[in-house]
């Protein structure tokens, strides 16, 4: 029986999402070093020393059917980050898009917009998802604004949801997009990509 969702590569003009592979390790370390992203207290980007374990963790979750991890490549084919379908609920056809991080040099570019367009399009149009979730730290205003710009609706705040590596407790903001909202969200993302930068 084929796993759901199946392992795929998703390709656009500014970005490609390829199945995560241990061979990506060194390039992912270099991408994380661009901006020293692991030092951001409100997010969980693997440090250079922890990258191999994070790749192993994500691939383990893939093997158990709970995550579909991708390595993110820019238009030139350079590795610039990671993203996933996670918290996969195959029985109810629900996924969360998360555990995403990008090298500083590609943040706030068309790359993230197109990556979300590819992931959402695949989720709704190929996988038949009934909902796609996004979760982030309540205090991560940059991430929350980016999720809201996608057109996702705030479902609520999970208070005292998880423990962070630094010992603080995370309140998690939960957002979602459902199928009836997808046409408008898709049109908005395509408009953003077509707009001059």
Image (cartoon, rainbow, N blue to C red):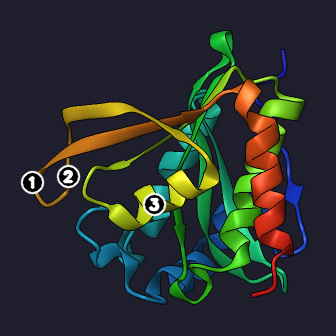
Side (left or right) of 13 relative to 64: right
Crowd around label 2: few <14 · some 14–19 · many ≥20 (10 Å): some
Q: In the picture, which quadrant includes the N terminus?
A: top right
| Disc 2 to disc 3, C-alpha distance | 21 Å
Side (left or right) of 19 relative to 32: right
Q: Earlier in the sequence, mark 3 or mark 1?
A: 3
Q: Residue furthest top?
A: 91
Residue 3 position by quadrant: top right
Q: Between 137 and 20, which is closer to the camera in this rendering?
A: 137
Which residue corresponds to mark 1? 167
Which residue corresponds to mark 3? 145
What's the mark number on residue 164?
2
Residue 183, horizontal then vertical, whole percent: 82, 38
Residue 17, horizontal then vertical, whole percent: 77, 60
Q: Between 33 and 51, which is closer to the camera in this rendering?
A: 33
Q: Nearer the viewer, mark 2 or mark 3?
A: 3
User: Eyeballing the image, is 176 above or below 170?
Assistant: above
Q: Between 192 and 46, which is closer to the camera in this rendering?
A: 192
Going 42% across and 56% down the picture, which residue do you hit? 144
Crowd around label 1: few <14 · some 14–19 · many ≥20 (10 Å): few
**Do the residues bearing badges 2 and 1 touch, measured as CB atoms within 8 Å?**
yes
Side (left or right) of 16 relative to 116: right
Residue 147, horizontal then vertical, whole percent: 52, 53
């Amino acid at each position: 029986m084929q796993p759901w969702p199946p392992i795929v590569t998703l390709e656009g003009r500014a970005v490609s999402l390829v199945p995560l592979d241990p061979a990506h390790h060194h390039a992912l370390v270099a991408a994380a070093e661009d901006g020293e992203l692991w030092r951001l207290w409100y997010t969980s980007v693997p440090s250079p020393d922890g990258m191999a374990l994070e790749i192993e963790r994500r691939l383990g979750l893939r093997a158990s059917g709970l995550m579909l991890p991708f390595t993110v490549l820019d238009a030139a084919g350079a590795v610039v980050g990671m993203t996933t379908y996670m918290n996969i609920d195959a029985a109810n056809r629900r996924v969360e898009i998360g555990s995403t991080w990008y090298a500083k040099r590609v943040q706030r570019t068309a790359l993230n917009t197109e990556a979300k367009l590819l992931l959402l399009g695949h989720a709704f149009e190929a996988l038949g998802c009934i909902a796609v979730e996004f979760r982030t730290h309540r205090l991560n205003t940059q991430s929350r604004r980016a999720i809201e710009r996608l057109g996702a609706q705030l479902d609520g705040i999970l208070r005292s949801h998880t423990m962070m590596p630094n010992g603080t407790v995370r309140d998690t903001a939960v957002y979602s997009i459902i199928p009836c909202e997808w046409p408008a969200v898709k049109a908005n993302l395509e408009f953003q990509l077509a707009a001059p930068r």
